[in-house]
Image: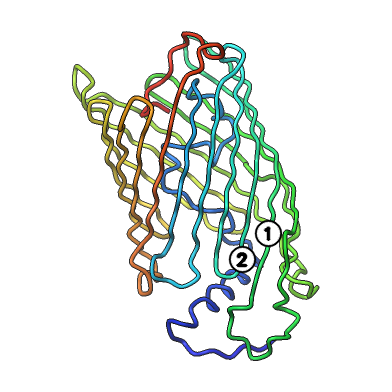
Amino acid sequence: MKLFFKLNKNSLTLIVALVFMSVIKTEAQQYPVYSQYIFNPLVINPAVAGSHVQVSATAMYRNQWVNFDGAPKTFSFSGHTSLLKNKIGVGLLVANDQIGSYNNNSVFGSYAFIIRSAMGTFSMGLQAGFNLTSADFSSLNLKDPNDPSFAAFDNKFKPNFGAGVYYSNDLFFAGLSVPFILTNSVDITDAEALANGVKEARYYYFHGGMTLPLSRMKTVVFNPTVLLRGQEGQPLSMDLNAGFIFYDVFSVGASYRNVDAIVTYIQLKITESLNFGYSYDWTSSDMKQYSSGSHEFSLNYRFRIRKIHGNVECPSVFKF
């Protein structure tokens, strides 16, 4: 397979496609990276389902590596709630991830068994669902448009499942998860030479943090958190986060991601039900030569159904 292209802005889409193919072969980053998992941890851990007690629905949009043609764009919708007097949690995660000529749609449902005690809440979660992957290489500047290695394909169906555990109390939370256990083969094209050895990566997440009041009336709270992101065959990735919560209404903070970026974020409680979040990734890797950074937006809406949730106390939006 031979490709000829010029290094200019119009050819960056082709570069991204080539990088995407090469990183899949080496089992590099395949699952979207979210900066606001702090406020929506269901995207990395199914055991979080039901932790907000009431119905909690979140829409997230991430535009990664702005100004880089063909860079990843991710939209996700997630929702979860507790049932049976807060004994179980159920959730749903739907996402669309685009990078270059590739498009991946995923749908996963989650279930969590919740155990409450005076010491805190412990839950064990499972998730199951599928990915539908497609690709259209018609926009690429190929030397041979009929190259079989770049034959378009639609809706490759790949089922998967995962599991996690989660613990939280008034001051502390921690979770461990493997959201995708199966390492399915990825048939990028009909060319067996490309498909040989290509696998979906297995991810391991550990996330935890604390909420430490800095004033007697708890009007200012320090919120340090950490995320360890492991992937088979790749170096360990780590996010170190430091946030401050003011009057249980506004949160601001920064994160250090050792492999790629410095992240700044805000979270605002607009009403008792509606919450808005924004984060910006200041790219620190070599990608900064081509991109000014990454934007991520989130909108969370929470409401209680009295017949289902009764008078059970619902945690603050800033409690995890």
Crowding at mark 2 (Cα within 10 Å: few <14, some 14-19, many 20+): many
**Quarter-of-image position of residue 221:** top left
Image-quadrant location for residue 178:
top right
Residues at circles 2 and 1 in contact by the CB criterion of under 8 Å:
yes
Residue 172 found in image quarter = top left
Q: Residues within 10 Å of mark 1 (few under 14, many from 20)?
A: many
Name which residue type carries label 1.
Thr
- Work out which quarter of the rendered image holds the N terminus and state it: bottom right
The residue pinned by badge 1 equals 133
Q: Is residue 145 above or below residue 77?
A: below
All told, the count of numbered labels is 2
Q: Residue at x 55, y 49 (%)?
A: 230
- Find numbered disc 1 in the image and state the secondary structure of the residue it sits on: strand
**Image quarter of the C terminus:** top left
Report whether 81 appears left or right of 264: right
Amino acid found under the numbered disc labelled 2: Tyr
Mark earlier in primary sequence (2, 1): 2
The residue positioned 49% from the left and 21% from the top of the image is 54
Compared to 251, does 19 lie above or below?
A: below
Residue 108 locus on image (x, y percent): 65, 41
Q: Nearer the viewer, residue 210 or 288?
A: 288
* Residue 18 picture location, percent across and down: 59, 76
In the picture shown, does residue 312 fall above or below 12? above
Question: What secondary structure is marked by label 2?
Answer: strand
Name the residue tied to disc 2. 102
Residue at point 63%, 71% (across, down)? 21
The residue at the point 44 percent across, 54 percent down is: 62
Name the spot of residue 319 as percent of width and height, x first. Answer: 39, 26
Residue 214 in picture, x, y percent from top left: 21, 25
